Image (cartoon, rainbow, N blue to C red):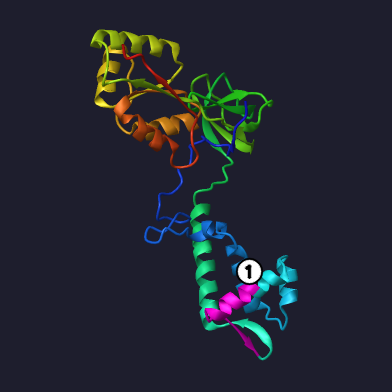
Amino acid sequence: MTGPAHPVQPPVPRIPPRRGTHGDADAAGGEPQGLLALMKPGRLTELLFLLELSTNPSGRLRPIANRLGVSVQTISLLHRKFRKEGKVAVVEGRYRTTPAGVAELHGLISAIRADLDARMTELQLVRECRAIAAATIHRADPVVLFMDAGDLYARPGTDGPSRGTAAQGARRGQLVQVEQLEGVLPLPPAGVLCLVLPTRRTASSDLRVGRLRRALGSGNGRLLAAEGLEAVHALRHASTRPFVRFGVAAAAREASLLGVPVVVVVSDSHLRALLHRLAEPYPSVPVEVRTLPSN
């Protein structure tokens, strides 16, 4: 079983920014901004065309097409488009950007640069971290890092995708500083099981609690949560385990992305909204839905 490679650090999933921040859609116009603006068909070619005319004016369109790796027809269409908008002109026999074209180019590049700067602050090159010792570790021992139930562990050895060197000794269960990190730590997301509790046509409360108790017994969720008043009430009587009641979708997503299986008991009237929140923001997490019998 494989999954996306995470940096060798306690792999806290990065939640993408909300709408209105760097690369997301502009709140007013709905158009992608920053780096994501280049996903719009033809936008990258437009930017490079304006950049060519600003930094390397030419008397012919074919050399520009050759440098950009596109057809002369494409460049000709871009020229007509930008000339009509007043952003490109022929000056002294050469195709050049006008002040309006330079302003357009400057705005695009500035937005992309700001977006990249914001994203770079979220990326860290980690060369050391702390982990829980899974066994006795001596100073300078080579160690292997691995995840278990959302926690980062270190064990003596060299056979593993993420490796380092212990900065000091530690007994089992203690924190150990690991330096000289190398490699990546594969971390496939764990499943989120949604146990749907019917609330419209349902059997007696005792029967419903009994069915929920049996369903929980067959699940492997290390994180337990409830969404909806009926689900909270039933779960309180079906299990003595502590469970998450507030911020359920966010907690379930974070646990899943850390490799921790989740079980969410959800009232049927809350299921649609819960599934929507589990699906966003990217990346999505694997979700299974099971409905408990209603009679």
At a point 68% along the width and 27% down the height, the residue shown is 158
Q: Visible in this render: residue 92? A: yes
Q: Is residue 161 magenta?
A: no
Residue that label 1 marks: 48
User: Which residue type carries mark 1?
Assistant: Leu
Q: Is residue 83 magenta?
A: yes
At a point 25% along the width and 8% down the height, the residue shown is 206
Q: Which residues are magenta?
A: 77-91
245 or 233, which is in the foreground?
233
Residue 114, compared with residue 252, is above or below; it is below
Rendering coords of residue 220 (x, y %): 46, 16
144 or 87, which is in the foreground?
87
Say whether residue 44 is left or right of residue 268: right
Report which quarter residue 291 is drawn in: top left
Quadrant where the C terminus is found in the figure: top left
At a point 27% along the width and 18% down the height, the residue shown is 201
Say whether residue 88 is left or right of residue 121: right
Rendering coords of residue 259 (x, y %): 51, 27
Say whether residue 290 is left or right of residue 84: left
Residue 186, compared with residue 21, is above or below; it is above
Report which quarter residue 7 is drawn in: top right
